[in-house]
């Protein structure tokens, strides 16, 4: 039975649907609508009295449904809703459940677009948002209230790789009846089991590790069937954030190798972090599995690996960081992550550029900080590339 399958088997087979032709590969159903044999059949389908049936691609599609069932099985949730991008998933998870007058508590260390949704979009429509240091449990305890509807955080923060205690924060949130919404991108579905640690809703940018080859934008919200179908779906199907069937097909194909890719990339990330650690040209090296990481013990409990990301601070600030980046050969400069190709990013001038300098400093986003997403290249080649670039500094 499917529930007994191991991760790699689920990543290849769960949710598969075959047409009358018995195709081996997942089919792409490139259609915006569906045909009904009778008017009565159309009425019944709109009333959702049918089984595995669809009415409009904005509401659902067979290819997309395969992807949703597969990612829900891996994540350990009852259901999932696939979206056009990772930010559509973050927006959908939050806005679908909140109303004017509601209260949300969020970790302060977030990706820039997530901050925009919390600081600008939610507040614009009357939702009160309180920000805390996500690693400080006392701040969470003081911030949650009897009217808090949700807490939101990245399980591993972007870009400084702070790790938040999912189980502890979930206990605090659940004590007041709040939902726990976790952006789990850096942890990946392979290394984190956030649901078993207390999270209620898991959000991914599938653009990252799930696609893993820089081909398409996508996102997904995972949660209980009631939350997905009664809260998320009505909002998303009417506001039009559905994933396209072609993108769903890309994501399905990406999932077949997700476990293999993430484990290989995580091994490389750790190898690079250990090799760079102590280099005099760097003021710090950040990786969850390094012993000097502030949450190293938590990472060992909460994740099966340290993940595919590392970060390091180059002495000399922005000028030195730019010299380093411009000297890279194999590793490419981009703002994506979780790709088969290794990617270096300068957060202070790209992904987190809009943050005020004092907030960057508070989050540890210094002028010399470089975020590195380890790819599938040979680790020795990547290390040589890093050392050559550091020589240019």
Image (spheres, rainbow, N blue to C red):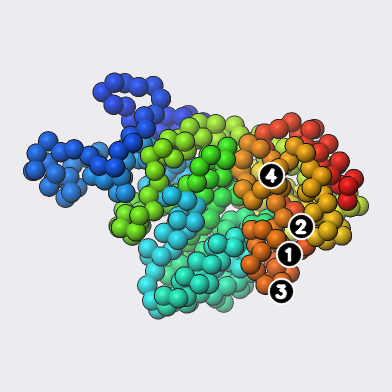
Whole-Å distance between the Cαs marked 4 and 3?
A: 27 Å
The picture places residue 367, in percent across and down from the top left corner, at 78, 62
Q: Is mark 2 on a helix, strand or loop?
A: strand
* 1 or 2: mark nearer the eye: 2
Tag 1 near tag 2, CB within 8 Å: yes
Q: Is mark 4 on a helix, strand or loop?
A: strand
Q: What element carries label 3?
A: helix
The picture places residue 246, in percent across and down from the top left corner, at 41, 37
Work out whether residue 55 can be spotted. Answer: yes
Q: What is the crowding at mark 4: few (fewer than 14 residues within 10 Å), some, or many (at least 20)?
A: many
Mark closest to the chain's N terminus, 2 or 3: 3
The picture places residue 151, in percent across and down from the top left corner, at 50, 66
Tag 1 near tag 4, CB within 8 Å: no
Mark closest to the chain's N terminus, 3 or 1: 3
Q: What element carries label 1?
A: loop
Mark closest to the chain's N terminus, 1 or 4: 4
* 3 or 1: mark nearer the eye: 3
Mark closest to the chain's N terminus, 4 or 3: 4
Work out whether residue 304 can be spotted. Answer: no
Q: What is the crowding at mark 3: few (fewer than 14 residues within 10 Å), some, or many (at least 20)?
A: few
Whole-Å distance between the Cαs marked 3 and 1?
A: 10 Å
The picture places residue 63, in percent across and down from the top left corner, at 36, 36
- The disc placed on residue 358 is 3
**Could you tell me which residue is drawn at 33 percent across and 36 percent down?**
30
Q: Which quadrant is the N terminus positioned in?
A: top left
Query: Total of numbered circles in the picture?
Result: 4
Residue under label 2 = 369
Residue under label 4 = 343
Picture quarter containing residue 50?
Answer: top left
């Amino acid at each position: 039975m499917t529930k007994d399958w191991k991760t790699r088997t689920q990543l290849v087979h769960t949710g598969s649907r075959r047409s009358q032709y018995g195709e081996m590969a997942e089919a792409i159903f490139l259609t915006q609508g569906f045909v009904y044999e009778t008017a009565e059949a159309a009425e019944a389908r709109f009333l959702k009295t049918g089984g595995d049936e669809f009415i409009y691609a904005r509401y659902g599609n067979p290819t997309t449904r395969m992807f949703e069932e597969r990612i829900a099985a891996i994540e350990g949730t009852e259901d999932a809703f696939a979206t056009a991008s990772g930010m559509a998933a973050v927006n959908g998870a939050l806005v679908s459940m909140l109303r004017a007058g509601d209260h949300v508590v969020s970790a302060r260390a977030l990706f820039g677009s997530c901050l925009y949704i919390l600081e600008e979009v939610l507040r614009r429509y009357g939702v009160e948002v309180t920000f805390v240091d996500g690693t400080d449990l006392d701040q969470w305890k003081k911030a949650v209230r009897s009217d808090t509807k949700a807490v939101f955080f990245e399980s591993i923060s972007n870009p400084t790789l702070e790790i938040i205690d999912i189980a502890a924060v979930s206990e605090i949130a659940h004590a007041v009846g709040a939902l726990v919404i976790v952006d789990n991108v850096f942890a990946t579905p392979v290394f984190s089991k956030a649901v078993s640690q207390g999270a209620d809703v898991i959000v991914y940018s599938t653009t990252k590790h799930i696609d893993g080859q820089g081909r398409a934008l996508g996102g997904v919200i995972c949660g209980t069937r009631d939350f997905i179908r009664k809260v998320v779906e009505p909002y998303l199907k009417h506001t039009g954030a559905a994933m396209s069937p072609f993108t769903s097909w890309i994501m399905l194909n990406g999932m077949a190798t997700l476990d293999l890719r993430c484990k290989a990339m995580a091994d490389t990330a750790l190898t690079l972090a250990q090799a760079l650690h102590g280099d005099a040209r760097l003021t710090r090296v950040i990786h969850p599995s390094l012993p000097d990481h502030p949450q190293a013990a938590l990472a060992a409990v909460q994740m099966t690996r340290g993940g595919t990301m590392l970060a390091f601070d180059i002495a000399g600030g922005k000028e030195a960081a730019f010299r380093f980046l411009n000297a890279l050969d194999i590793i490419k400069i981009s703002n994506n992550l979780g790709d088969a190709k290794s990617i270096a990013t300068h957060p202070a001038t790209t992904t987190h550029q809009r943050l005020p300098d004092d907030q960057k400093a508070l989050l540890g986003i210094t002028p010399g900080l470089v975020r590195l997403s380890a790819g599938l290249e040979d680790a020795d080649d990547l290390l040589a590339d890093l050392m050559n670039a550091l020589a240019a500094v």
